[in-house]
Image (cartoon, rainbow, N blue to C red):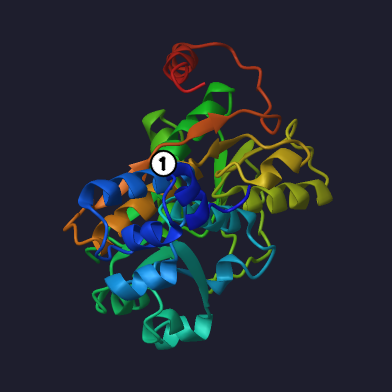
Amino acid sequence: MKNVTMKDIADKLNISTVTVSKALSDKDGVSNELRDKIKSIAEEMGYRYNSLAKGMKEGKSYNIGILIADRFIRDDGDAFYLKMYQGVVKALSKVNYYGIMEIISSDSEKKVVLPNILSDNKVDGIIILGQISFNYVNLVKNTAIPLVLLDFYDELLDVDSIISDSFYGSYKITNYLIAQGHREIGFVGNIFSTSSILDRYLGYYKALISNGFAVREDWILNDRSEEGEYIDFKLPDQMPTAFVCNNDGVAYLFMNKLKKLGYNVPSEISVVGFDNDIVASISIPKLTTVEVDIETMTETAVDVVIQKINGDKLTIGRKVITGKLILRDSVAKLERKTDKLDHKIKEGLKQYI
């Protein structure tokens, strides 16, 4: 689609390009009525202001910094976070802003080094995408630049955050496994790694104990080091019939591990994930998971940071965006004698499926 120019606007209104230029730059020589009309037509036609010139006048860069720790993109390109980054950029473009990503190295995070985009005054606000250390968030917060956390929160810092409903999503998908006859269910994820993994573990935990089933420590499997590097899974001697994985990428790796060891997924062991990442639909079998509403999360984060930039003393606290179950082929239904518990669980799940 061709970019709309000042000449296009001038031709539509049958006026000179000079008049359009004066109106859009708020210069003298144009009546208020005509100025408003020109701006209205420009918006209708999709005219994009020269952000550099506009920014110089208003004291803004019209750039938002997007900070992400390198551990989230260093291995397989973590499609989930790249997709979320694309969502942020798309939402920013709707309000005539640009996104500048800066990848924070492990060394910079440990040494708490201010990101370049802040030290060079290149941005009007910051969105931190994915969990980063308390000290690093606090460093950015203390610059007093408008700040929003996306896909994580820190309960020790008073910073607005946009997160998926990890707790309730994991609770729902664990209850789905129970409804399919599973009573022995494990969890895969380092629960001390991120706030979202911990919340997903707690949702899994609640589903089990509220239904009277045991939570066994040897069925809680670690998936990564403290630095965020994926590690090999250490399987228990006695395997459960199903596992809840903290995300789809881990679920994909875990299913491959099981298949290499001779297990059939899902007839012998069922596996579920979280996020509805691309691997969920290309894995064999296709993965049952919880879909994260990336569009709503990213649009909300952009809306909040722009309001802060514009001087609104907005405080939202922790904004939770609900996801939904996506049922595919990675869960086997176990044949058990129907009891009152099964009936209760199935009835409760009707609202989600």
Percent of width and height locating residue 245: 58, 47
Q: Secondary structure at mark 1?
A: helix
- Seen from the viewer's position, the closer of residues 294 and 246 is 294
Number of dots carrying numbers: 1
Q: Which residue is at a point 69% across and 34% down the rendered structure image?
A: 330
Q: Is residue 101 positioned above or below 343 on the image?
A: below
Residue at which label 1 appears: 203
Percent of width and height locating residue 265: 75, 37
Q: Which residue is at a point 42% across and 44% down the rendered structure image?
A: 13
Q: Is residue 115 positioned above or below 69 on the image?
A: below
- Seen from the viewer's position, the closer of residues 144 and 33 is 33
Give the left or right position of residue 225, taking residue 313 as reference: right
Give the left or right position of residue 70, taking residue 91 as reference: right
Percent of width and height locating residue 128: 41, 65
Q: Is residue 82 positioned above or below 206 on the image?
A: below
Q: Amino acid at mark 1?
A: Gly
Q: Is any atom of residue 349 visible in this view?
A: yes
Percent of width and height locating residue 27: 27, 66
Place residue 115 in its image quadrant.
bottom left
- Seen from the viewer's position, the closer of residues 209 and 228 is 228
Q: Is any atom of residue 236 visible in this view?
A: no
Q: Is residue 117 positioned above or below 49 on the image?
A: below
